[in-house]
Amino acid sequence: MGLIDSLKKAFSRPYKTISVAQAKELLSSGATLIDVRSTQEWRTGRAPQAKHVPLDRLQSSTAGIQKTRPVIAVCASGVRSASAARLLAANGYDAYSVRGGMAAWRQTGEPVR
């Protein structure tokens, strides 16, 4: 592997950043949605199908997340979900991060409970 290939690999993202619409498509195909926000944020409203796994507990709490399905992470704005997706991808998951997080989810008119 040459230097350029090594640099590309080192700086490439092992996960994909997707829109709310793309997340909905993946969810309809059986993907798992995890909300990595704090418990306080979770209580302010969440996507109905989301599982709550705060980012600080994700590394030890992936047991209930199937590797056979894509996993979509969402947070408030997309920063923590990117960290979660990176961690999941490093552990063999097909991982995604929702661009804009729950703010984008709400702006598109998707349900929140």
Image (cartoon, rainbow, N blue to C red):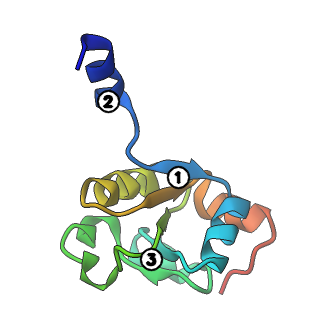
Q: Residue furthest right?
A: 109
Residue 45 located left or right of residue 107: left
Residue wearing tag 2 = 9
Say above or below: 79 vs 26: above
**Front residue (pair 41, 80):** 80
Question: What's the distance in space between the residues labelled 1 and 3, CA to CA?
Answer: 17 Å
Q: Residue furthest left?
A: 60
Q: Residue at x 33, y 55 (%)?
A: 89
Amino acid bearing label 2: Lys
**Front residue (pair 61, 27):** 27
**Front residue (pair 68, 17):** 68
Residue 41, position as x, y percentages in the image: 49, 73
Q: Quadrant of residue 107?
A: bottom right
Secondary structure found at label 2:
helix
Q: Residue at x 24, y 60 (%)?
A: 91
Q: Residue furthest front?
A: 1
Residue wearing tag 1 = 78
Q: Quadrant of residue 66?
A: bottom left
**Circle nearer the viewer, 2 or 3:** 2
Question: What's the distance in space between the residues labelled 2 and 3, CA to CA?
Answer: 37 Å
**Front residue (pair 80, 24):** 24
Amino acid bearing label 3: Gln
Residue 31, position as x, y percentages in the image: 53, 75
Q: Which mark is first along the chain, 2 or 1?
A: 2
Tell me the number on the disc at residue 98.
none
Give yes or no for contact between labels 1 and 3 (Cβ–Cβ under 8 Å).
no
Q: Residues within 10 Å of mark 1 (few under 14, many from 20)?
A: many
Say above or below: 25 vs 66: above
Residue 28, position as x, y percentages in the image: 66, 79
Tell me the number on the disc at residue 40.
3
Which of the image's four quarters has the C terminus? bottom right
Q: Residue at x 39, y 56 (%)?
A: 85
